[in-house]
Amino acid sequence: MKFPPLKLGQQIKVVWADSKSALGWKYDPEAQRKPGYIKTIGYAIQENEECLTLTTSLGEHGESLDELSIPVGCIQELEVLEEKNES
């Protein structure tokens, strides 16, 4: 997926495919086995050819809390929610 240009600290929403598991013995040949689709809202702190990294919170000196790196191949949708304020 090609992302819109992102700036460090922009608030974004990402919809991405995640692996899903079911514990215990299963036998249901008709079951629809699909990945789980997750919506995550956070602040972009890094992107490269392998992954996009978001954080839940940004400190005033650039520190981050609770980072999540999502593999680029799993990203289904990406929307910029808030432009980075350069003040």
Image: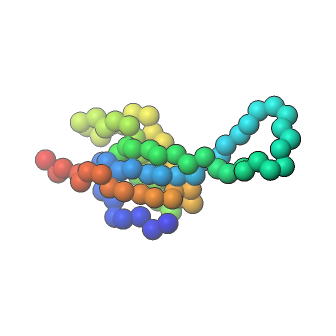
Of the pair 59 and 33, the residue shown nearer to us: 33
- The answer to whether any part of residue 15 appears in the image is yes
Q: Could you say where residue 23 lies in the image, as x and y percent from the top left?
A: 76, 32
In the image, taking residue 10 as reference, residue 72 lies left or right, namely right
**What residue appears at the point 23 percent right and 36 percent down from the top-left corner?**
60
**Residue displayed at 44% across by 51% down:** 14
Using residue 44 as the reference point, say whether residue 68 is left or right of it: right
Residue 78 image position (x, y, % from top left): 41, 57
Residue 3 position (above or below residue 43): below
Residue at image x 49%, y 66%? 1
Judged from this view, the residue extending furthest toward the front is: 30
Seen from the viewer's position, the closer of residues 30 and 8 is: 30
Q: Residue at x 65, y 46 (%)?
A: 19
Does residue 8 appear in this view?
no
Residue 84 at x, y percent in the picture:
23, 51
Q: Quadrant of residue 25?
A: top right
Residue found at the very far top of the displayed protein: 24
